[in-house]
Image: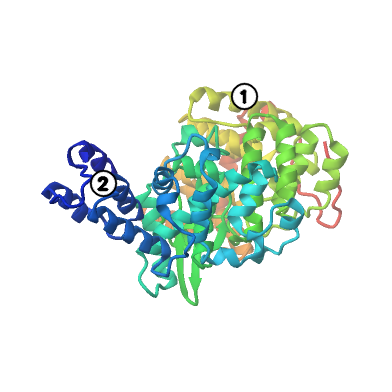
Amino acid sequence: MIAFFLLLITPLFVDANPQIKYKPSVKAVYSSLDPNSISENLNFYKLYPNTELGKKAYSRALKLLSGGKPISQDIDLPKVDLSILVSMVQKKPLENPDKISEKTLDCIESLASRFKNRGLKGHEVWTKEELLALPSDEIDLARALFLAEYDYDLNKKKQIRYYEASIDLMALQIQARLPRRPTDEDKVRKINDFIFHEMQFRFPPHSLYAKNIDTYTFLPSVIDNRKGVCLGVSLLYQCIAQRLGLYLESITPPGHIYIRYRNGRKTINIETTARGIDIPTEKYYGIETIKLQQRTVKELVGLAFMNQASVYWGKQEFEKSVSLYEKALEFVEDDALLKELYGYNLFLVGRKDEGKQILDTIDPYDKQYLLSEKNILEDFIDGKTDTEGLKAVFMHVDETQESILKKQEKLKEAVDKFPAFRAGLLQLASSFLQLLEEKKALEVLNQYFAIYPDEAIVNYYLSIIHGQRMDYKRAWKHFHFLEKVLNNNHLYPKPIKYYKKALMQKSPLFSRLSKKQIREIAQVEKEDQQSLPSSNLPTKKCHCPNKKSKKHHHR
């Protein structure tokens, strides 16, 4: 805002003669400058270069850029392209980064030479071989991301340097706002203030990121647009933290990522989709969460390509998604989920033998992070779905009713062909709930329960829906099934405790069901189930295969 105000007043108050007395309005503008803002002081100097106040602003900007340390003799801001430097400090994307001068880049890199990432071996690499050979703790995240995104093309070296310089300037501005001897918590607060309040990086609207998640994942787009999905902003956050010598953990609950700072018993969670607020860890646990997965710096690079692959998978451009999963595998070497997704896509492009070979390396019963994390894999290898079923469950959906209905039809086809396909049934029920067709959703969930009564997710949904319909006897029945599954897996997350408390307040009468009451409810539900169209039911009850016999039937 101050920069815009300065531009408005320029024609009235520019004074090339430093001997002439300053007009009060110019003094007022100078006095209103944020003394810790590099961009405001540089912009003022740009407008008033030959005045004493302009020189004072320039001197203050230099001090901020240098972190209060002595300036190298080869740094002379007037000799660089100051307009471009100001634009970069204000994070205004250049139409053509190639136009930036080498002198400007050299100047920024010299100013940022004290940052901690400069001591990493990864800051010196420019080839794929060098990068992949590095241990995770030696990787400069920004350099790795840019090299991989630009496919190690050294013709793009200047663009890489430009975007690295942009991150350097962000870190320099944050450093300028830190106290003299900052703690790690000071750094977290100032990064939050800068990214989410000063520069106003935001999570994009669903209609944008659902179609272009790769645009809001990779750093150049995130920096240029000031918008990013959880992964995109988390990557930027980690790149800045590396420069400031701040160690942060990257945590990936299913379908999400957030940043975590830990020091002894002190934990600060940084939710990048909600302006960096500290969300309690328990909020990241769903009803089936076994534990949260922590990612290395090297894996973060691979996750960016996994995100991009999901876009092409949703568009059913499977050759591109295969290529991107292969790129991700270079950085995420032993991740069961990545292998699983890659294996499916190999099937979808007709490379079935290779896909089978990949999937055979995964234990479908080893569930580290989520009770249902391998349900699709189990069903696929046991012949309870095929590639068309995979296409249906991973089909892209946006906010439109047309999109939901289109996917719903594909899911119906998949479930008609394979009535025991769990992901198909669950997503079909979800599609009915999205369209506010609760009764149809309930029918599908009852079908799911008739086949798999010992799964947490289906009992959770059935308990909630019956509770909303004030059928508390059935709501408690499914809650007891849910509680039994969770107890058998040594889980009892807080969301379940909260839900049980809410259910108890509404209906304490059925909180303790006898075996006879449960049998009576089961009989009623059996009668309800028999009233469903026969085409929706499997011809016989499907059982999970014996763990010892891991017989794969890949379809």
Q: How many marks?
A: 2
Crowd band around label 1 with a 10 angstrom C-alpha radius: few (<14), some (14–19), many (20+) = some
Can residue 7 be seen here? The reply is yes
Q: Mark 1 sits on what residue? A: 409
Quarter the N terminus occupies: top left
Q: Earlier in the sequence, mark 1 or mark 2?
A: 2
Q: From the viewer's side, name the closer residue of 54 and 63.
A: 54
Residue type, mark 2 in image: Ile
Q: Position of residue 433 (x, y in %)?
A: 49, 34
Classify 518 as above or below 471: below
Classify 340 as above or below 386: below
Q: Position of residue 411 (x, y in %)?
A: 64, 30
Quarter the C terminus occupies: top right
Q: Nearer the viewer, mark 1 or mark 2?
A: 2
Q: Is 398 placed left or right of 548 in the picture?
A: left
The residue drawn where x is 55% and y is 34% is: 212
Crowd band around label 2 with a 10 angstrom C-alpha radius: few (<14), some (14–19), many (20+) = some
Residue type, mark 1 in image: Glu
Q: Mark 2 sits on what residue? A: 2
Q: Secondary structure at mark 1?
A: helix
